[in-house]
Image (cartoon, helix red, strand yellow):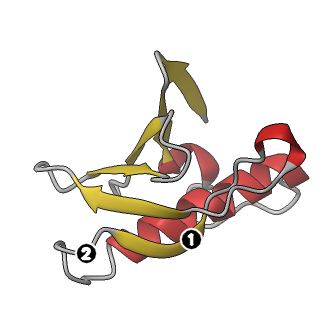
Amino acid sequence: MGRPIGGTWATDMRHCLDALGAIPDGLPGPALNLTLFIGAIVAWVSSGRSAADPRTNVPCRRSPGRRRCPGEIFASFEADRSTIVWHCPVDAREKWTTDARRE
């Protein structure tokens, strides 16, 4: 689903979905949680809201030291309009990219 590249995770939403574009039944819990997290970011960014405001309502899922990060994900489309770049401004150690193409 994703792989680290020097502090960056590259993910592809299509790896989380079946041929009809739905979340498959029987997806293991950790994979389902990550799919729902990435899906919430993709849905928020592709909803047509203002590009000037990168804030989402999606909480950061990192838990350094077993303490939940209090941050909220910031996300926006890249110029190609199919790649979403997102990060948590509180825990800014990592950047993420998500391919949101619907092919």
Residue at left offset 25%, top offset 75%: 53
Q: Amino acid at mark 2?
A: Asp
Residue at left offset 40%, top offset 61%: 74
N-terminal of the two: label 1 or label 2? 2
Q: Is residue 72 left or right of residue 43?
A: right
Residue behind mark 1: 58
- Mark 1 surroundings: few (<14), some (14-19) or many (≥20) residues within 10 A: some
- Mark 2 surroundings: few (<14), some (14-19) or many (≥20) residues within 10 A: few
User: Outermost residue, left direction?
Assistant: 79
Q: Is residue 11 left or right of residue 17?
A: left
Q: Amino acid at mark 1?
A: Val
Secondary structure type for disc 1: strand
Secondary structure type for disc 2: loop
Q: Position of residue 79 (x, y in %)?
A: 10, 50
Q: What is the quadrant of residue 56 in the picture?
A: bottom left
Task: Identify the disc placed on residue 53.
Answer: 2
